[in-house]
Image: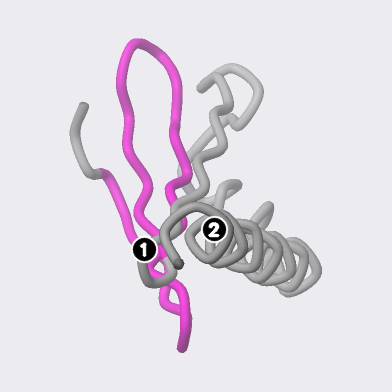
Amino acid sequence: MRVVGRIPHPSITITIFEYNEKYTLKLEAGPMEQSYKITTDQAGNLQNLHKIADSQFLNECLKHFNAMYLSWKEAIERNLTD
């Protein structure tokens, strides 16, 4: 897997990987991570991934990160606190 691009964002690290005729769009925020795969046939080229990662998509991803964090926090509190 090799890094083929990055998409700037103020609160998410967005890295684009290419491997086995697939792109992976990896988003990281704190300890949470989301990955989205798309074939190179579907995406066409790297510039199209920048189009896919529009503000609406990234806002939804931020909501997912928040939900992930809350689930993680609740699991820790439920299982690791006395």
Above-or-below relation of 49 to 71 = above
Residue drawn at (44%, 58%) of the image: 32
The amino acid on which the numbered mark 1 sits, given as a three-letter code, is Pro
**x, y percent for residue 41:** 58, 17
**x, y percent for residue 53:** 63, 59
Does the CB distance between marks 2 and 1 fall below 8 Å?
yes
Q: Is residue 42 left or right of residue 40?
A: right
Above-or-below relation of 80 to 29 = above
Q: Which residues are magenta?
A: 4-28
Looking at the image, which residue sits at the far bottom?
A: 10
User: Is 69 in the magenta?
Assistant: no
The amino acid on which the numbered mark 2 sits, given as a three-letter code, is Trp
Q: Which residue is mark 1?
A: 31
Q: Which residue is mark 2?
A: 72
Give the structural element (helix, strand or loop) at label 1.
loop
**x, y percent for residue 38:** 58, 27
Looking at the image, which residue sits at the far left?
A: 2
